[in-house]
Amino acid sequence: MWEGTLRSATGRDYPVRRGIPRFVPEDSYAHNFGLQWNRFRREQLDTEQGGALSRKRFESETGWSHSLAGKWVLDAGCGAGRFAEVAASYGARLVAVDISSAVDATAESLAKYPQVDVVQGDLLNLPIRHAAVDFAYCIGVVQHTPDRARALRSVVDAVRGGGEFAFTIYPRKPWTKLHAKYLARNVTKRLDPELLLAMLERVMPSLFAVGDRLFRLPGLGRVARFASPFAVYLESERPGWSRDQRYRESLLDTLDMLAPRFDEPMTEDEVRDALAPLGPTALRFTGIAGLNVVGVR
Ligand SMILES: C[S@@+](CC[C@H](N)C(=O)[O-])C[C@H]1O[C@@H](n2cnc3c(N)ncnc32)[C@H](O)[C@@H]1O
């Protein structure tokens, strides 16, 4: 595994640790995600869990599959690499970027793909040239950055003219911020993520058992879900998964709901306004997976 220093053309040095160039300091506002994805690296990888949940999401949220073969593709905010491994399996020449030490998890998840580069860097200051890639996707990331408009523009700016991009963002509806998680987050986002995870590990077995019964009730289940600051995946949502697999993903997603420093969902108009300065960029809001938008640069 490479260790060393990467020197830029302008003479700036960046450390390379465990084979990954690091363009940002180890610690950032997103260090909770480093903990999350290194602790729960396998839970959402198709190759680990069986099935094709991530592949189906990737294809429906980007519209791409075999067209990626041999193309330069950017995964902006790769997490543990659940979508990166799908893109890599299509033969994409992938650059997977994340601001947190989640990059160590991605590198492990994608070790068998020689055409993948993993980079620790900030979307708001991407270490990638303008118009350098053919495709870029950014799934579940923008709402977790301190400047959502800049994050959107930065990813699109990395795409060449005629190239394609796709985003999935938490959608903001008038009632979104009434969800119990936003109430709980006032406290939980300030806790040390290690401590939060230790607390969740104590209470989640009971909460999961209750949610697993309550959330499946017709009508009442939806209300209970909205009023609960924790996630529970039901058998109907994860067919073929064991109870333990569903429990692990529920614990992971509860941490994902409660730990991030930033969680600001967006409206379609906000996304349109953010991308307007880039000029004529064909946008299509697909109506799937919350706020999903695809476009051509
Ligand atoms: C909810 S996770 C989603 C990960 C992955 N895209 C997925 O869907 O599984 C959000 C990820 O965005 C990353 N992130 C947040 N702000 C970022 C930034 N400014 N630059 C790069 N990555 C960022 C976090 O570190 C985290 O891994």
Image: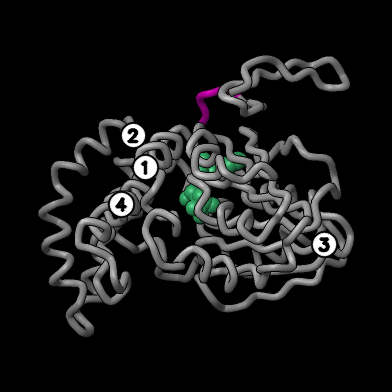
Mark 2 CB within 8 Å of ligand 1: no
The residue that mark 1 highlights is 259
Does residue 69 appear in the picture of this structure? yes
Q: Amino acid at mark 4?
A: Thr
The residue that mark 3 highlights is 163
Q: Give the mark toward the camera: 3 or 4.
A: 3
> Mark 1 Cα within 10 Å, few/some/many (few <14, many 20+)?
many
- Residue at screen point 20% across, 62% down: 243
Q: Amino acid at mark 2?
A: Pro
Asked if residue 65 is among those painted magenta in the image, a careful observer would answer: no
Q: Amino acid at mark 1?
A: Ala
> Mark 4 Cα within 10 Å, few/some/many (few <14, many 20+)?
some
Q: Secondary structure at mark 3?
A: strand
Residue 254 tag number = 4
- Residue at screen point 56% across, 24% down: 18
Image quadrant containing the N terminus: top right
Q: Secondary structure at mark 1?
A: loop
The residue that mark 2 highlights is 193
Q: Give the mark toward the camera: 1 or 3.
A: 3
In the shown orientation, is residue 114 left or right of residue 280? left
Disc 2 vs disc 1: Cβ atoms closer than 8 Å? yes
Q: Residue 107 lies in what quarter of the image?
A: top right
Cα–Cα span, label 3 and label 2: 38 Å
Please state the extent of the stretch shown in magenta in the rendering: 25-29
Of mark 4 and mark 1, the one earlier in the sequence is 4
- Residue at screen point 27% across, 38% down: 197
Of mark 2 and mark 4, the one earlier in the sequence is 2
Cα–Cα span, label 2 and label 4: 12 Å
